[in-house]
Image (tube, rainbow, N blue to C red):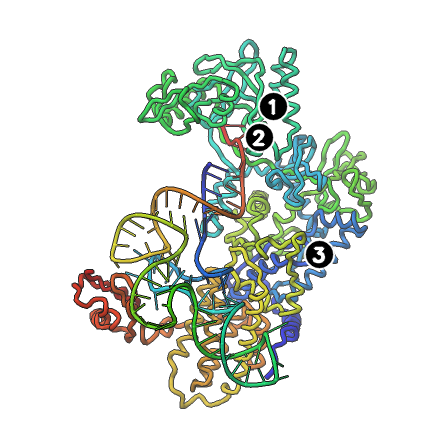
RNA sequence: GCGAGAGUGGCGGAACUGGUAGACGCGCUGGACUUAGGAUCCAGUCCGUGAAACGGGUGGGGGUUCGAGUCCCCCCUCUCGCACCA
């Protein structure tokens, strides 16, 4: 018997697939399309187990759908711009382009060695000018529509990466990539107006229901953070002007006992200038501004503030209200100023307690009185209005509406909607990224590069030192340019785009990757949207939000006709070893190359799919891998042991119903399990079936039945372990490759049914016996048999039988007295 | 603190709409075949008793039900996300 040699088998079929172009697909209007996409990798050097897991899951679905008759688009590419390439240049003196392309070449080889069914003709690398050219075009179109703008503002600055970060890229006050503590910096940069789509991005979350994990939808909703409220002007006392605040609780406006401005609020300086408090306040503001984002946003930080010495007037009741500034009010949100109602807001309450500010109750619960001096915390619930003039006695909900109406009618404020979502800052002070296609002209200002001059190529001759800001600024040949508008001398923008811009539309480019006349054509209509997207949860509010935004923008620019890019999303769990995420610093990394060399790609894939369901974390265990390797050997031996039995005549054998039933059972189970992404149970069932086939190895089974079983086994296992199945299919069964073009086997529900069914007999809910009855036995007969079962009789003897419950084909429960 | 998810053998994990808890795999125990094996095969493996019978058992406590891992209430633990957003 031939030994199972994964290396030999796997390289043989990989070569075959490539030569026969098995994975290449074209548009075919006669077939239903299925776009299966996995998040493309950053070419960091080599694949890690997280990639292998992601792509193994994807490959199962791609192959399965293809065998089901779908025209499956399954592309792969490279998220090729990014900092590590630049760091490699700084550390090892290798050019980012060289480093990137070498990594791509190696990782591509690894992907091929895993047997993933990608159509490599569609491969894209985002650092290729033919890719980012279109991105630059989108930028210009967005600029023309006011969706890309330049602004001078306080941005997140990562000292480690020496560049700006978008809000989404700051995780717990730290850089999402390098973990450095993020600071603030005043900087001029380019922004994409994602806030213009806040409402739609939020609303369309409804369209994702059912297709996306609820968790991701919730995270996106929270990130967008819509809140409805009221803006109100509080006139300043003794001078011109007013303080505009935003509140979601207009019903508490009679309970305002102080105002708080964000330390960055322009009025702070204005109000204290030339007063005795000037020094104290300035000192405070300086101190707060110095606090890093991490410190200022962490819970431990105590609320602190200072009185500005100024007062304003509550426009509803004329009360005189002191104005403070404090660290817990953010300039970025709402109007940067709040009305403080300590009785009904916990933060205001804490602040009032600390500084001895008055507390005034304006809402009481329905069933009791509320006294300010009794409060140990703010009362934030609903109730009845008190101390609120004309609104007393009203429910606070009603008062909310009435007060808003009044404020709007008097012209001192308006209802507004606020979002937490900020515009997306895309300028990066780095080299290895797509250049922003703008030329600054001393007389015309920023001018977009004309379309016909795109792409603005990233120059390759550049010195990368990691010091002194953007490397592009040093390349005079790049920087100096003619103003497209007036023809005068101008200078190019030297910042590059955030790499999340590239990943916001790559899935569209796969549809027409080589097209030179435009970013995409009618093929995008055929393939999009992506039917199934697979990747890690870490992009729940980064990539996935940006990609949704881009899709909507491109739709409005006339390129697309749909609203959402990804119909279904599967977020896979992490790969864990020894209780922790695999990482170099922990030294618990398992290298895919190692696994392939020792066990082969099929075993590696099988283990990953078998050890845990996709959305859960996967615990890497060498012993588990060995178990899977053992199974494939068992499978291999089974085929060669059965091989001689396949040759004989099929006549003269007793029809074996159970043997046939198992075939259909397997088809049903595996199909259903793949549909719900329960690959582990699908594989478990196939293992069980193989165990059964070994048991009946010496039984007189017709050769045609054996053949049917083995063929089914190959077909059902193929999405998981494509190489070994292809080999057995051809070498033992003598069939034509590739399996990918064979039809997924269907099952006959009638044949899945067993002729005899096992009925569990319970007495008072406890299992006491089991009986076997022929399919179709009438209920009355089954109940009789159950009562006669010895195990049941032991427990019913001498007792009164009260009820008999029958669950068809499952159990009988005899309820009797005790 | 808020929100979501999860707690099942020695381990990874099964159990679709309430209906035999522990499938499958790992590990472990014993045996067979072997010069040998960490190869392969057979048997066993939730706990209590040698075994049957029986009893207990899905984080803890209550409840609904003929019947609860599954549904409801309270509590504990863990993971993830958000975290002064007015």
Q: Mark 3 to mark 2: distance in Å?
A: 41 Å
Q: Nearer the viewer, residue A310 or A612?
A: A612
Q: Chain of mark 2?
A: A
Q: Nearer the viewer, residue A769 or A806?
A: A769
Instruction: Tell me whether marks 1 and 2 sit on the same chain.
Output: yes
Q: Which residue is depicted at the point 45% across and 51% down?
A: A210
Pointer 1 or 2: first along the chain: 1
Q: Is residue B18 above or below residue A297?
A: below
Q: Nearer the viewer, residue B26 or A708?
A: B26
**Disc number placed over residue A263 in the picture, else none:** 1
Q: Chain of mark 1?
A: A
Q: Label 3: how many residues lie within 10 Å, few (<14), some (14-19) or many (20+)?
A: some
In percent of width and height, residue A457 lies at 75, 47
Q: Mark 1 to mark 2: distance in Å?
A: 16 Å
Closer to the eye: label 1 or 2: 2
In percent of width and height, residue A335 lies at 55, 25
Q: Nearer the viewer, residue A427 or A115?
A: A115
In percent of width and height, residue A255 lies at 43, 19
The quarter of the image holding the C terminus of chain A is bottom left
Q: Mark 1 to mark 3: distance in Å?
A: 46 Å
- Location of mark 2 (residue): A301
Pointer 3 or 2: first along the chain: 3
In percent of width and height, residue A367 lies at 31, 26
């Amino acid at each position: 018997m031939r030994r199972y040699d994964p290396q030999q088998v796997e390289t043989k079929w990989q070569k075959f697939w490539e030569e026969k172009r098995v994975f290449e697909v074209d548009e075919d209007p006669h077939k239903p399309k299925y776009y299966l996409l996995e998040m493309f990798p950053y070419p960091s050097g080599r694949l890690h187990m997280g990639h292998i897991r992601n792509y193994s899951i994807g490959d199962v679905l791609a192959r399965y759908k293809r065998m089901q008759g779908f025209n499956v688009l399954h592309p792969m590419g490279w998220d090729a711009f990014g900092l590590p390439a630049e760091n490699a240049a700084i550390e090892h003196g290798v050019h980012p382009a060289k480093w990137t392309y070498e990594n791509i070449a190696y990782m591509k080889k690894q992907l091929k060695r895993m047997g993933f069914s990608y159509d490599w003709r569609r491969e894209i690398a985002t650092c290729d000018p033919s890719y980012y050219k279109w991105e630059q075009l989108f930028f210009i179109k967005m600029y023309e529509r006011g969706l890309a703008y330049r602004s001078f503002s306080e941005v997140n600055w990562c000292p480690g990466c020496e560049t700006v970060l978008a809000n989404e890229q700051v995780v717990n006050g730290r850089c999402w990539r390098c973990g450095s503590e993020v600071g603030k910096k005043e900087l001029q940069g380019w922004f994409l107006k994602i806030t213009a789509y806040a409402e739609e991005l939020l609303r369309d979350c409804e369209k994702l229901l059912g297709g996306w994990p609820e968790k991701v939808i919730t995270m996106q909703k929270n990130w967008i953070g819509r809140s409805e409220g009221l803006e109100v002007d509080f006139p300043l006392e003794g001078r011109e002007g007013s303080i505009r605040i935003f509140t979601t609780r207009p019903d508490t406006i009679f309970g305002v006992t102080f105002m708080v401005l964000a330390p960055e609020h322009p009025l702070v300086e204005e109000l204290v200038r030339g007063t005795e408090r000037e020094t104290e306040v300035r000192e405070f503001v300086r101190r707060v501004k110095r606090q890093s984002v991490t410190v200022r946003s962490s819970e431990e930080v105590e609320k602190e503030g200072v009185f500005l010495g100024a007062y304003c007037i509550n426009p509803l009741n004329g009360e005189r209200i002191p104005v403070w500034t404090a660290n817990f009010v953010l300039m970025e949100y709402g109007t940067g100023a709040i009305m403080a109602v300590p009785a009904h807001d916990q933060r205001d309450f804490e602040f009032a307690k600390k500084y001895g500010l008055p507390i005034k109750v304006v809402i009481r619960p329905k069933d009791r009185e509320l006294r300010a001096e009794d409060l140990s915390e703010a009362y934030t619930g609903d109730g009845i209005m008190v101390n609120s003039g004309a609104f007393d006695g009203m429910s606070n909900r009603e008062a909310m509406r009435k007060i808003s109406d009044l404020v709007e009618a008097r012209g001192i404020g308006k209802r507004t909607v606020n979002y937490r979502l900020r515009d997306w800052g895309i300028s990066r002070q780095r080299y290895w990224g797509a250049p922003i296609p703008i030329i600054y002209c001393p007389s015309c200002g920023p001018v977009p590069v004309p379309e016909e001059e795109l792409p603005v190529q990233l120059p390759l001759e550049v010195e990368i030192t990691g010091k002194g800001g953007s490397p592009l600024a040093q390349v005079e040949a790049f920087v100096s340019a003619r103003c497209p508008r007036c023809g005068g001398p101008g200078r190019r923008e030297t910042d590059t785009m955030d790499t999340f811009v590239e990943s916001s539309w790559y899935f569209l480019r796969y549809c027409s990757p080589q097209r030179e006349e435009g970013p995409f054509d009618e093929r995008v209509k055929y393939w999009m949207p992506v039917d199934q997207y697979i990747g890690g949860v870490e992009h729940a509010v980064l990539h996935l939000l940006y990609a949704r935004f881009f899709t909507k923008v491109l739709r409005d620019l006339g390129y697309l006709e749909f609203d959402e890019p990804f119909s279904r999303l599967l977020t896979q769990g992490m790969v864990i070893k020894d209780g922790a995420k695999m990482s170099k610093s922990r030294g618990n990394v398992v290298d895919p190359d190692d696994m392939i060399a020792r066990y082969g790609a099929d075993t590696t894939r099988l283990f990953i799919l078998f050890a845990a369901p996709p959305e859960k974390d996967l615990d890497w265990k060498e012993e588990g891998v060995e178990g899977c390797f053992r199974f494939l050997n068992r499978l291999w031996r089974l085929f060669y042991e059965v091989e001689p039995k396949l040759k004989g005549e099929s006549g003269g054998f007793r029809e074996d119903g159970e043997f046939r039933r198992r075939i259909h059972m397997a088809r049903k189970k595996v199909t259903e399990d793949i549909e719900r992404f329960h690959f582990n149970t699908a594989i478990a069932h196939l293992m069980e079936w193989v165990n059964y086939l070994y048991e009946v190895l010496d039984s007189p089974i017709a050769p045609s039945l054996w053949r049917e079983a083995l063929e089914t086994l190959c077909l059902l296992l193929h999405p998981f372990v494509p190489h070994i199945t292809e080999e057995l299919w051809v070498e033992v069964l003598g069939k034509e490759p590739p399996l990918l073009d064979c039809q997924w086997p269907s099952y006959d529900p009638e044949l899945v049914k067993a002729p005899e069914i096992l009925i569990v007999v319970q007495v008072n809910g406890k299992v006491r016996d089991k009986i076997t009855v022929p399919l179709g036995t009438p209920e009355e007969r089954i109940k009789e048999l159950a009562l006669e079962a010895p195990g049941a009789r032991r427990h019913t003897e001498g007792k009164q039988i009260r009820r008999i419950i029958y669950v068809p084909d499952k159990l009988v429960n005899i309820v009797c007295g005790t």
